[in-house]
Image: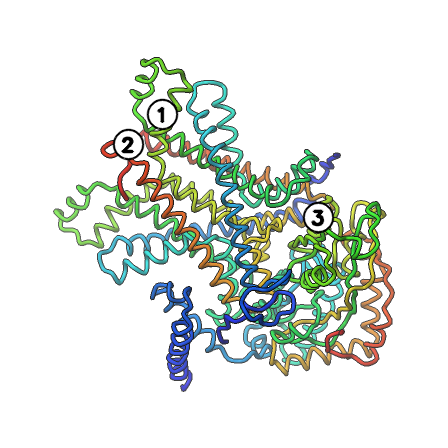
Amino acid sequence: MTFDFTFFSGSLLQTYVLHGFLFSLQLTVLATCGGIVLGTVLALMRLSQRALFHWPATVYVNGMRSIPLVMVLLWFFLLMPFLLGRSIGAEVSAVITFIAFEAAFFCEIIRSGIQSIPKGQTSAAIALGLSQQQTLRWIVLPQALRNMTPILLTQVIILFQDTSLVYAIGAYDMLKGFEIAGKNSGRPVEAYLAAALIYFLICFSLSQLVRHLQQRTSFTK
Amino acid sequence: MAWDWQFFCNSTITTEATASCFGKGGDITYLQWMLSAWGWTVSVAALALVIALLSGVAIGVLRTLASRWKLVAMMWVELFRNIPLLVQVFIWYHVVPAFIPALQALSSFLLASIALGLFTSARIAEQVRSGIQALPRGQSQAASALGLSLVQSYRYVILPQSLRIILPALTSEVMNVVKNSSVAFAVSVTELTLFAMQAQEETARGMEIYLAVTMLYVITALTLNRIMAWIESMTQLPGVIGVKA
Amino acid sequence: MAYPVALILEEKAVRVVINQYFFNQGCKIMKALPLCMRTIALAGICLISGITQADTLQKITESGAITLGYRESSIPFSYLAEPGKPSGFGVDIANKIVEAVRKKTGKKDIKVVFQAVTSQNRLPLVANGTVDLECGSTTNNATRAKEVSFAVNYFFAESRLLVKKSAQIKRLGDLSNKTVATTTGTTSFTQLRKLSLEKNLNLSVVPAKDHADGFLLLESGRAQAFMMDDVLLAGLVMNAKNPAEYEIVGEPLQTEAYACVLRKDDAAFKVLVDETLIGLMKSGEFEKLYKKWFESAIPPNGKNLALPMSQRLKENLKSPSDQPAS
């Protein structure tokens, strides 16, 4: 079995893969920001005592966590034009789907982060005369997010890997870039190997970064 | 746009309604196709789970041993964790058979299950490792004081306890395997996601099909969740390990 | 103004109908759904049933952009020679239609947005409004005409089999008990299942995600044959590593007409598209385009399909039709 490693030449990668890589990156960043914001809201709703907030959030989070991401992508892609009243492309649909999907996972992480803050903190805040909103905003959330940063970052790495699934709705991400490069040059085997290598390098370095971060924060604790 | 659930009873070949909702001879209805697709999903998930548990526990144990096998295990975990599952499935389907011609004879079902199983094994290995490390060191010390060999101490003392500790995490891994089995659509395994995409194109009834397929996924996930909860209650050691959910 | 009122009344009516149908018929799935999910489902129905009829030209004028669907490996109709830049016979036709839209609406600055479609989602995407026009290798047939509308036919193809010469397969009957690949969402997939049952061939049908993938299955030996329209097969063989290894065999299993896909019940847009196509055919532009894509060197590898215009297509040029081929 001969391999043609000229496949890895710059021009081929640049033409097909760069475009896809930028999209994957963009999707990850947007999904992270949107997901954390929405996830925090969902976490607060889940922790609230009022049934009006508690139950919709619980149903949403449990629902999103039990359906495969591919199905959620297909659902949103089918329903988006109806809900928004106008057509949107696969890329935009993917961004919206990922924000909605990842919010459920970020919600669980943030919720466990909030619950891990010692009760003494909230008691002290009340003793100081802070209202509930102020306690959340200034005391609880900053600490919770700081504690949960390594786990949140791990989830971001998983998110980056999951962006390859937009394949199902035809969006042009890095994996699709490699695939088209492979098919157009008749070398699918080298293309998939290259894709695996690039993904590995990115995710591995990110996870080493997370581990380094974890060691630093646990030292200061 | 109206709901039309009737098409489930249509034959997939002649697209006409059949009397009962199940076709005769080789002719099948969409309902039968969906159920067989569900069967494939469950089969892929089951096979992958077996592979994942066996290799995951082995690798997790290796990571806790103080020997050069630790490095091998670490490389295994890092390799399978850092490559997206879809890419791994493609690798097993297109690339590995090019290197090992014997694997070309394997069906896409087996290759997809192997890919899914090994991906999950890396995650299970991490959980097993954290479960073993959560045990007090006194346990392994007492085991060796009693004269048990390394293998015996793992088999009789350490693993039973650590597996009970990580059962909740294993439950979520089992549910993840079912969800991840949807990735097999990319290599032509006719499971639920592929059925959803194909049937939607053929019958133009996207909403109903997606709804039915989603319901099946949810049902499968919930059933597995209950089974794992039952296993948890069966294996709990009252007062020692395992809190009743 | 009556719109919200109509929506509410419609929702009530729909709720009654659903309750009657599902609970009287004893549909277990619907009963098992918790109340909140049912409400979500009903809300979905409301929104969907509230959408009015399609008017593509108005939509294009309002949004200032037209979304064209393209295929990734339907050589030479619609494929990606470079990322973001679909090319092909169908794409050129679609671009001519976009020029006609610009003239008709009087807006010179209408942008073109390209959206990748697969054989599985092209029809739903046109039907739900994501894609306004798709000119690729979509077969015009009566079943699909219930969901979408087809313009004037611009190509005629026949389904045949692609096999490796070394396999010595000459017709469908030789494939008894073997594995045949075909692309999901195509008419070939449905047809193969039907033929397998009728002729008792016991075929193992492997669905591939797209045409290039199906070819890969044949190339790697996972399938003994790949069934698809002959022109698409020719395009795939042309770009293969060893074109001499393959041959297209078998009696034509079905004749298919390719046409552009647009939304149903959109008379104004259909008239525009049909007029553009007929204009191209009458003025000789169509033949020039055909020569460019079927009888000359095409990207990405500069190979030539060398496929002269079929008799059926020539007849269609004289009297264009938008009806299915058979």
Q: As drawn, which residue projects farthest toward the bottom?
A: C2
Residues tagged by mark 3 and mark 1 found on one chain of the structure:
no
Task: Point out the frontmost of discs 3 and 2.
Answer: 3
Amino acid type shown at disc 3: Leu
Which is more toward the observer, C180 or A40? C180
- Where does residue B231 sit, x and y in percent of width and height? 35, 40
Label 3–label 1 contact, CB within 8 A: no
Are the two marked residues, 3 and 2, in contact with CB atoms closer than 8 angstroms? no
Seen in the picture, residue A32 relative to C41 is either above or below; the reply is above
Disc 1: which residue: B158
Relative placement, left or right, of A92 versus C269 is left
User: At 58% from the left edge and 67% from the top edge, which residue is drawn?
Assistant: C125
Residue B48 - label: none
Q: CA distance from mark 1 to mark 2?
A: 30 Å
- Residue furthest front as drawn: B25
Disc 1: which chain? B
Q: Quick one: label 2, few (<14), some, or many (20+) residues within 10 Å? A: few
Asked if badges 3 and 2 are on one and the same chain, I answer no
At mark 1, the secondary structure is helix
Residue that numbered label 3 is attached to: C217
- Which circle, 1 or 2, is nearer the viewer? 1
Q: Which residue is mark 2?
A: A221
User: Is B23 on the left-hand or right-hand side of A160?
Assistant: right
In the rendered view of the protein, which quadrant contains the C terminus of chain C?
A: bottom right
> Distance of mark 3 from mark 2, alpha carbons?
56 Å
In percent of width and height, residue B64 lies at 41, 24
- What is the chain letter for disc 2? A
Residue flagged by tag 2: what amino acid is it? Lys
For residue A178, above or below residue C296:
above
